[in-house]
Image: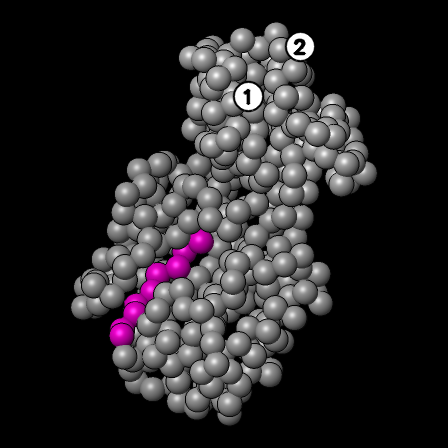
Amino acid sequence: MNRSRRIAALRELFSENYQGLLITDLKNIRYLCGYSGSCGTLLITRKEAIFFTDFRYQEQSAAEIGDVAEIVIFKNNQIELLKDRIKKARIKALGVEKSLNIRQFLMFSEEFKKDLYPTESLVEQLRQIKDADEVKSLQKAFAIADQAFAELTRVIKPGMTENEVAAHLEFFMKMAGSEAPSFDTIIASGPNSSCPHHQPGSRKLKKGEMVKIDFGAVVDGYHSDMTRTVFLGKATAKFKEIYGIVLEAQKRAIKAIKVGAICKDVDAVARKVIADAGYGENFGHGLGHSLGLNVHEAPSLSPKCEDSIRPGVTFTVEPGIYLPGWGGVRIEDVFLVKEKGLKQLTNTPNDLFEIKV
């Protein structure tokens, strides 16, 4: 992966108002120079890239960053060291990210007076388009999630608690090579499944109920995300009805995703299917989002997003219907937009799945 090329692309986005940009968002730092630690700041000037961290990450930063940026290890006051290097680089006006904390902002504001320029998602703009190396990492993360889900379907059964199911799933992902769960795993059984982001608890799974499973793996910092709603035993007529509507909404939305399409228009396709079936009020979240180093990234498939879809963007497509007191169904798959067509990253079948009990 050519991180120097990413830094060069970022410089192309610089405003004429400033000569340097201070990167404080750790995911953006990882994207630009490869550093995956929890303490660091990256200064990008029109000619230099300088990374600042402390002694704890001296070896890690050297191994991960290499010669992409100069590495400076601070011992005491990081802010003063940053200000000194900024002066040496003859930066008279500085661009900063919105992740800059209040203390840093106040200190730099005092130093630069009116010449401190908050920027809006410059690195995030670059991150929207995934390169070949990023796609490889995503594919590995999705393959781990697919494998873990297959293993889970062999052990999940009535009597297990939601917490126990989550623990099994996260264990399977970890053993398959996941660095961590993409987010807090969602296991929502029975009526709990009407809550889109239910936190698993001590409720025991029961025969004759649905279980909504939303989870993901992480590889090289890149996140997968998938939701399946399974049924313990023979599915009821009501579950089949709701599942069929959600699946149809997803299929139609997938067909609408193409280069040049407007994000909110894709969302509207799925929303209409659910509304026409009489459940419009029970689909209250956006259809999907991009993902990468964060599990939720821009652009999104939502009623408010007017972005035009570009090749290289990833999208989740996750319609749902949630009925309080009964339960809910969500089906989520992820796609990479190509110049022509889509590449599906999730490989677990999304047909109605009944767990034999």
Residue 193, position in %: x, y? Answer: 37, 74
Seen from the viewer's position, the closer of residues 116 and 11 is: 116
Q: Is residue 243 visible?
A: no
Mark 1, secondary structure of its residue: strand
Q: Residue at x 49, y 78 (%)?
A: 162
Residue 54, position in %: x, y? Answer: 72, 34
Mark 2, secondary structure of its residue: helix
* Amino acid beneath label 1: Leu
Q: Quadrant of the N terminus?
A: top right
Return the residue at label 2. 88
Looking at the image, residue 27 sits to the left or right of residue 237; the answer is: right
* Amino acid beneath label 2: Lys
Seen from the viewer's position, the closer of residues 316 and 214 is: 214
Residue 73, position in %: x, y? Answer: 75, 29
CA distance for labels 2 and 1: 15 Å
Return the residue at label 1. 21
Q: Residue at x 74, y 30 (%)?
A: 75
- The range drawn in magenta is 316-324
Q: Residue at x 27, y 47 (%)?
A: 303
Neighbourhood count class around disc 2 (C-alpha, 10 Å): few under 14, some 14–19, many 20 upward: few
